[in-house]
Image: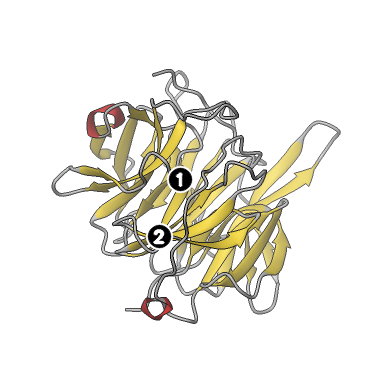
Amino acid sequence: MKKTILVRARNSFRAGVAFALAASPVSVFSSDRQIAFERDQAVWIANLDGAGEKKIADGIFPAISPDGTRIAFNTTEKTSDTTYARHIAVVDVATGKINVFKDIPSDNSYYPSWTADGKQILFTTRPHEVWDLAVVNSDGTNFHVLKPGVEGEVTRYSPIWARDGKSVFCEDMSKIYQIGLDGKVRAQWTIDDIVPDGDMSGDGRIDVSPDGKRLLLSIDMAEGSGRTNWDGPLPALWTFDLESKKATRITPKKLFGWDGVWLDNDNVLFLSRDADENEDSIYRMSIDGKNLKRLIKNARFPSVGAPSA
């Protein structure tokens, strides 16, 4: 399957699917958790049921902290008619105060991911001709490169912390990696071995389950979509058990799903779009494919605070 690098601008070409929606028991979710998401180049939050939408800041790629009090995101500052500076920033949800990490030696940083304790942020940055995996404290101090990019090697995309904070996961469109804090590869898995006829693009997403035992993968499938208006691969969500090395598809072929994140060990959020719609929406579903419900219209790149202990 041909690999295609997709720039992480949320001008998604993907469409979703028309499907029946079923109600999901609200009682299994904590009422004080919130969803952060992107809409029209801005960061928004909403309650876990999709109500109470509120714009927080201008920016993209929001990642809400585990305790739900802060959101890390990307600023996009126009520096000329054709160029932008992109920095990691953190906004306090209660006050709206923004801390832009301008001491990071790059004007091209993306895709923040929190440690489970909320003390550090992982991201990708390009201070030179290749992309590095880097880490910074949540207040913008102690920047350091975790895994330098190497000229001639494929970029490591979609970085996400392991739940214990002792390693990170990422992908290069052919393989998924687990990398230690020393920058060394601890484990790797070839994507089309664990998911036959599947691969990941540069904007594919990885998320780690709250118990740390499974990955949620946004996979591009080599399957016909059955749609005349579909100009890309069919997107599907898969879980990957790190112990058994078994992958399981959780979205059927008729349900296009991508940008998935875990709500808890049994439920996920993800993006989809009805065949007759022009905008993505955030959906909730249990990993057995049941309790499907649309939560937020016109939204991209969801993230959610940690579930209650």
Applied colour scheme: secondary structure
- Tag shown at residue 6: none
Q: Position of residue 250 (x, y in %)?
A: 32, 48
What residue sits right under mark 2 in the picture?
A: 285
The answer to whether the residue labelled 1 contacts the one labelled 2, judged by CB atoms less than 8 Å apart, is yes
What residue sits right under mark 1 in the picture?
A: 257
Apparent side of residue 300 relative to residue 168 in the rendered image (left or right): right
Q: Position of residue 179 (x, y in %)?
A: 31, 43
Q: Is residue 87 above or below residue 118?
A: above
Q: Is residue 183 above or below residue 260?
A: above
Q: Is residue 48 above or below residue 58?
A: below
Q: Please name the amino acid that badge 1 sits on.
A: Gly
Q: Quadrant of residue 37?
A: bottom right
Q: Estimate how packed mark 2 is, as few (under 14), some (14 to 19) or many (20 or more) residues with alpha carbons within 10 Å.
A: many
* Figure quadrant of the N terminus: top left
**Residue pictured at 36% horizontal, 77% vertical:** 28
Q: Is residue 158 visible?
A: yes
**Residue pictured at 41% horizontal, 50% vertical:** 160
Numbered disc 2: secondary structure: strand
**Residue pictured at 47% horizontal, 46% vertical:** 134
Q: Quadrant of residue 95?
A: bottom right
Q: Estimate how packed mark 1 is, as few (under 14), some (14 to 19) or many (20 or more) residues with alpha carbons within 10 Å.
A: many
* Figure quadrant of the C terminus: bottom left
Q: Residue furthest front?
A: 20
